[in-house]
Image (cartoon, rainbow, N blue to C red):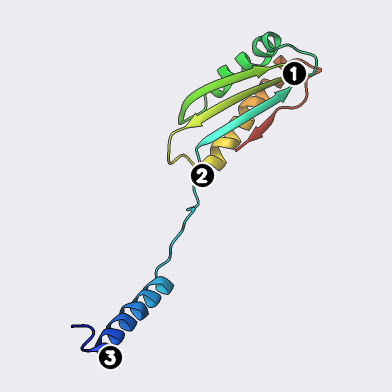
């Protein structure tokens, strides 16, 4: 049937193609939507300290303090030689700018109880 009416067949395919092009240009697609994972990481370097020292002197104290921040879901830490990494996971929908500010305030309060020769803690969103 399409062989008998080539002009109709060509017009049908051109109209479908034109409709596709118009739809593609007018529909906004995001392959990678902007998404902010609700997680904050606190990194504190302590040169010369073993993993057990970093955990006892830094990680535990920072974990206990960061656990008091509002809307927190889970706090975990990873202590390695010379570094303590504490990860705070928040509930979805939490404003991470305010959460980061709260965590920085809490960490600033405990700076005196952390080792003096350790570097300043870094709070990363």
Instruction: Estimate the spatial distance between the alpha carbons at disc 2 and disc 3, rounded to whole Å.
Output: 52 Å
Instruction: Estimate the spatial distance between the alpha carbons at disc 1 and disc 2, rounded to whole Å.
Output: 29 Å
Q: Quarter of the image containing the C terminus?
A: top right
Question: Which residue is tagged 1?
Answer: 82
Q: Residue farthest to the front? A: 3
Q: Residue farthest to the left? A: 1
- Secondary structure, mark 1, is loop
Which mark is in front, 2 or 3?
3
Q: Earlier in the sequence, mark 3 or mark 1?
A: 3
Which mark is in front, 1 or 2?
1
Q: Relative to 22, does residue 35 appear above or below in the rendering?
A: above
Classify residue 97 by image quadrant.
top right
Q: Earlier in the sequence, mark 1 or mark 2?
A: 2
- Secondary structure, mark 2, is loop
Query: Which residue is drawn at the image coordinates 60% and 36% (left, top)?
Result: 101
Contact flag, marks 3 and 1 (Cβ < 8 Å): no
- Secondary structure, mark 3, is helix
User: Is residue 43 rendered to the left or right of residue 17?
Assistant: right
User: Crowdedness of circle 2 by 10 Å Cα count: few (<14), some, many (20+)?
Assistant: few
| 87 or 22: nearer the viewer | 22
| 72 or 14: nearer the viewer | 14
Question: Which residue is tagged 3?
Answer: 7
Task: Find residue 36 and name its label.
Answer: 2
Classify residue 73 by image quadrant.
top left
Query: Which residue is drawn at the image coordinates 20% and 88% (left, top)?
Result: 4
């Amino acid at each position: 049937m399409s062989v008998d009416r080539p002009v109709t067949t060509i017009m049908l395919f051109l109209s479908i193609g034109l409709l596709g092009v118009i739809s593609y240009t007018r529909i906004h697609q995001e392959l990678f939507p902007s998404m902010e994972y609700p997680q904050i990481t606190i990194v504190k370097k302590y040169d010369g300290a073993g993993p057990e020292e970093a955990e006892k002197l830094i990680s535990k104290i920072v974990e206990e303090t960061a656990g008091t921040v509002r809307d927190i879901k889970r706090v975990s830490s990873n202590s390695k030689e010379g570094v303590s990494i504490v990860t705070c996971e928040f509930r979805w929908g939490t404003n991470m700018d305010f959460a980061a500010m709260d965590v920085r305030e809490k960490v600033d309060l405990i700076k005196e109880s952390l080792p003096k020769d350790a570097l300043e803690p870094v709070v990363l969103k």
